[in-house]
């Protein structure tokens, strides 16, 4: 039996919905990239995104970083609070029992901030430990999960993981080249929470192991830096191919110690980083189309939500196709570094979850 299980999940999304088909109409009048953006959108696999800051209403591109960070606190706290409340409601855990609150975000910082205010707003103890995993980018959900897993194993008390990403705050000032048009059309906003605890407190998929791989040779192919007008991203078109080439090494590191190979895993939760990234994973590991459909659906409805992306996929899959007792699953993320992370999960007794996969999407 695993020492840590994922006992409950919760999702909160901002209200504004952006239809990707009309995205080029938001470009400055006469922008030469309108046709290029239409082609990018057509091949992206994304139909819509949720954005906390609506570019049809506010011109965030002109804001200094300080204004964006203030807005993160204002928009992020109610989303995080709603996600955690939902996650807790699916468990027997009450807020006073939480030993660690881990906030993962690469899109907003400030102290006091979201994680400190969540303690009082949700009724957690003032002695609850707090941790902020910041600026690691899209792969950060699994380092956050690892920290919570370590806490549960070491202290035998529950932990809450919150992934809160508001990438809409980091729209850069024009002009926009092709790389920036891809970035502008890719990212969405979301908050996702998970409650982790020991198996004696309830059922859920167990955390078996975690593994990480940093590809130093290609570290310049994806970057995330603090700028004067928000955070700036660098994203090479070679990233999907590099992930596909490196992924078998990561899978061997994760699965081999447990006597497993990719063929022994039927449940795959893949960070929905983009259509080509999901394609690369499917091809690299010889997965069936149905095994990556959960990731494609989250990408279609919400875009790439940075570190919240994988938890969104896990929330949906744990409701629609929970791991059967003894069944193994793999969750994986990718991000700057170039970094790949993966977690091995196993179904425990009584892991059925209620809810439709579309409930939160």
Image (cartoon, rainbow, N blue to C red):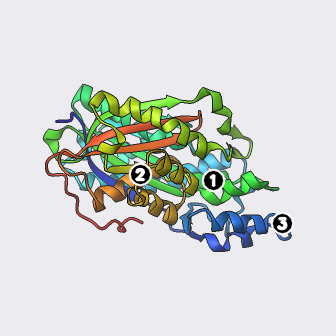
Q: Report the side of 288 relative to 335 (left or right).
A: left
Which residue was labeled with disc 2?
287
Compared with 191, 18 (above or below) is below
Comes first in the chain, label 3 or label 1: 3
Comes first in the chain, label 2 or label 3: 3
Kindly report which numbered mark, 3 or 1, lies closer to the viewer in this rendering: 3
Residue 132, given in percent of the width and then of the height, sits at: 46, 35
Number of numbered labels in the structure image: 3
Question: What SS does tag 1 mark?
Answer: helix
Which residue was labeled with disc 3?
31
Residue 324, given in percent of the width and then of the height, sits at: 20, 52
- Measured in 3D between alpha carbons, the distance from the residue under mark 2 to the one under mark 1, in whole angstroms, is 35 Å
Residue 35, given in percent of the width and then of the height, sits at: 77, 69
Which residue was labeled with disc 1?
169
- Can residue 132 be seen from the camera position used here? no
Q: Report the side of 127 relative to 131 (left or right).
A: left
Q: Residue at coordinates 25% horizontally, 38% vertically from top-left?
A: 158
Which class describes the residues within 10 Å of circle 2: few (<14), some (14-19), or many (20+)? some
* Picture quadrant where residue 346 is located: top left
Q: Nearer the viewer, residue 26 or 351?
A: 351
Question: What SS does tag 2 mark?
Answer: loop
- Marks 2 and 3: CB-CB under 8 Å? no
- Measured in 3D between alpha carbons, the distance from the residue under mark 3 to the one under mark 1, in whole angstroms, is 22 Å
Determine which of the numbered discs, if any, sits on residue 19 in the image: none
Question: What SS does tag 3 mark?
Answer: loop
Which class describes the residues within 10 Å of circle 1: few (<14), some (14-19), or many (20+)? many
């Amino acid at each position: 039996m695993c020492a840590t299980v994922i006992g409950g999940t919760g999702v909160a999304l901002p209200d504004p919905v952006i239809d990707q088909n009309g995205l080029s109409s938001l470009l400055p009048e006469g922008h030469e990239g309108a046709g290029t953006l239409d082609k990018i959108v057509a091949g992206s696999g994304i139909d819509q995104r949720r954005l906390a800051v609506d570019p049809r209403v506010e011109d965030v591109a002109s804001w200094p970083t300080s204004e964006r960070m203030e807005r993160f606190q204002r928009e992020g706290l109610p989303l995080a609070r709603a996600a955690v409340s939902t996650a807790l409601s699916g468990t027997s855990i009450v807020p006073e029992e939480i030993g660690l609150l881990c906030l993962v975000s690469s899109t907003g910082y400030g102290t006091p901030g979201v994680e400190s205010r969540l303690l009082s707003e949700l009724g957690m103890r003032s002695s609850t430990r707090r941790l902020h995993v910041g600026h690691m980018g899209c792969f950060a959900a699994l380092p956050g999960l690892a920290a919570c897993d370590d806490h549960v194993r070491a202290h035998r008390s529950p932990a809450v993981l919150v992934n809160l990403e508001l990438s809409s705050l980091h729209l850069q000032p024009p002009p926009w080249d092709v790389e920036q048009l891809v970035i502008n059309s890719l990212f969405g906003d979301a908050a996702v929470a998970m409650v982790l605890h020991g198996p004696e407190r309830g059922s859920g998929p167990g955390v078996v192991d975690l593994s990480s791989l940093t590809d130093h040779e290609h570290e310049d192919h994806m970057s995330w830096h603090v700028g004067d007008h928000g955070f700036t991203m660098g994203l090479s078109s070679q990233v999907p191919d590099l992930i596909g080439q490196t992924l078998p090494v990561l899978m061997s590191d994760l699965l081999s110690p447990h006597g497993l190979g990719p063929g022994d895993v039927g449940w795959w939760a893949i960070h929905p980083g983009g259509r080509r990234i999901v394609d690369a994973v499917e091809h690299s590991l010889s997965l069936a189309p149905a095994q990556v459909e959960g990731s494609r659906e989250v990408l279609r409805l919400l875009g790439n939500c940075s570190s919240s992306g994988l938890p969104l996929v896990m929330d949906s899959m744990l409701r629609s196709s929970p791991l059967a007792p003894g069944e193994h699953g793999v969750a994986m993320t990718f991000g700057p570094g170039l970094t790949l992370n993966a977690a091995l999960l196993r179904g425990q007794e009584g892991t059925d979850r209620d809810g439709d996969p579309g409930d939160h999407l």
